[in-house]
Image (cartoon, rainbow, N blue to C red):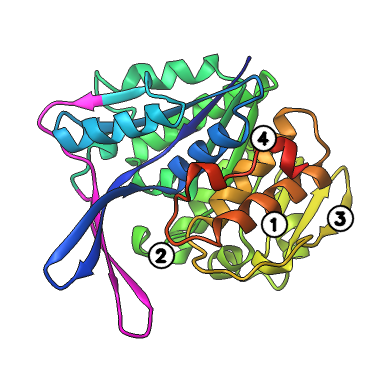
Amino acid sequence: MIRVAAIGECMLELTHRDERTLALGYGGDTLNTALYLARTAAKREIAVDYVTALGDDPMSATMLSAWQAEGIGTSRVARLPRRLPGLYLIRTGDSGERRFFYWRSEAAVRSLFMTPETEPLLAALAEYDALYFSGVTLAVLAPEARARFRGALASARSRGRLVAFDTNYRPALWPEPSSARAVFADFLPVISLALPTFEDEQAVCGDADPATTARRYAAAGVPEIAVKRGAHGCVILGGGHLVEVPVPKPVKAVDTTAAGDAFNAGYLAARLTDASPEQAARAGHGLAGAVVQYPGAIIPRDATPSLEQLI
């Protein structure tokens, strides 16, 4: 059994149905990847756990039940007394544009790896074959927790574990791009698989093209990089070889929410079962293509292709 831990933040999601009605759900980049990885690799020997901190409230309990129903392990979710998860609201305008409003400064995940309830989660990371996190994970961690987390990742990579990372830059979470750039650069030496989106790298580092992004990661010691370019496919760099992998079958996108998260899930599922990087990229494209044909981050379970269908 291949054990995977996705580390990050999942928040409560409120979506406007009309001026007086809101629908309650949940969302988070690393949780999206964990969910699609669990679904896509359901017939494979891959077990996915989510590592985070929630409150002791009913909404946190509802999230846990939903994740368990998706086959995601929740034994590494700390429940903090008198704390709550973060919250965001989505407001859609008349022309279809979406605006996001966040309440997360006091979220339980802000204490991750820093309290008696959450410190054991850090030691537990050593038990996994693969670790996955994102720039959002790094943004919500306190600086001391971030340093502890980096140490655990460095130890994991030194023992041959897969350490995968997606920049997933969110400007609202950082004082300025240079702050994110410095933190990301500090973590690059402990990463063995990078799954960045080119637009994020442009915003943070000013990269001119995807090849520049890939070579910058490689120069920092990352052995395998897949730079996502949305509908334009991706660029892979590994072993000194730069390869473009186009989207095999273009689709009409209804909603691109979680497209990158789904690509990461497909790529990871394929690589963890010994597919080549090119096969993994095609699996990522196929899963992302399925996800963008539905509104919202989480599509119906029966619409999610299996890894056997993707490769």
For the record, the magenta segment spans 79-105
Indicate the position of residue 130 as horizontal and vertical percent values. 61, 27
10 Å crowding of disc 4: few (<14), some (14-19), many (20+): many
State how far apart marks 3 and 4 are (Cα): 22 Å
Is residue 89 within the magenta segment?
yes
In this picture, is 110 found above or below 181? above
In this picture, is 41 found above or below 11? above
Q: Earlier in the sequence, mark 2 or mark 3?
A: 2
Position of 192 with respect to 180 (left or right) is: right
Q: Earlier in the sequence, mark 3 or mark 4?
A: 3
| For the residues bearing labels 2 and 3, Cβ distance under 8 angstroms | no
10 Å crowding of disc 3: few (<14), some (14-19), many (20+): some
Amino acid under label 4? Answer: Ala
Q: Nearer the viewer, residue 294 or 141?
A: 294
User: Where is mark 2, residue-wise?
Assistant: 171
State how far apart marks 1 and 2 are (Cα): 19 Å
User: Where is mark 4, residue-wise?
Assistant: 269
| For the residues bearing labels 2 and 4, Cβ distance under 8 angstroms | no
Q: What secondary structure is marked by label 4?
A: helix
> Residue 227: which disc?
1
Q: What secondary structure is marked by label 1?
A: strand
Q: Nearer the viewer, mark 3 or mark 4?
A: 4
Whether residue 99 appears in this view of the structure is yes
Q: Earlier in the sequence, mark 1 or mark 2?
A: 2
Amino acid under label 1? Answer: Val
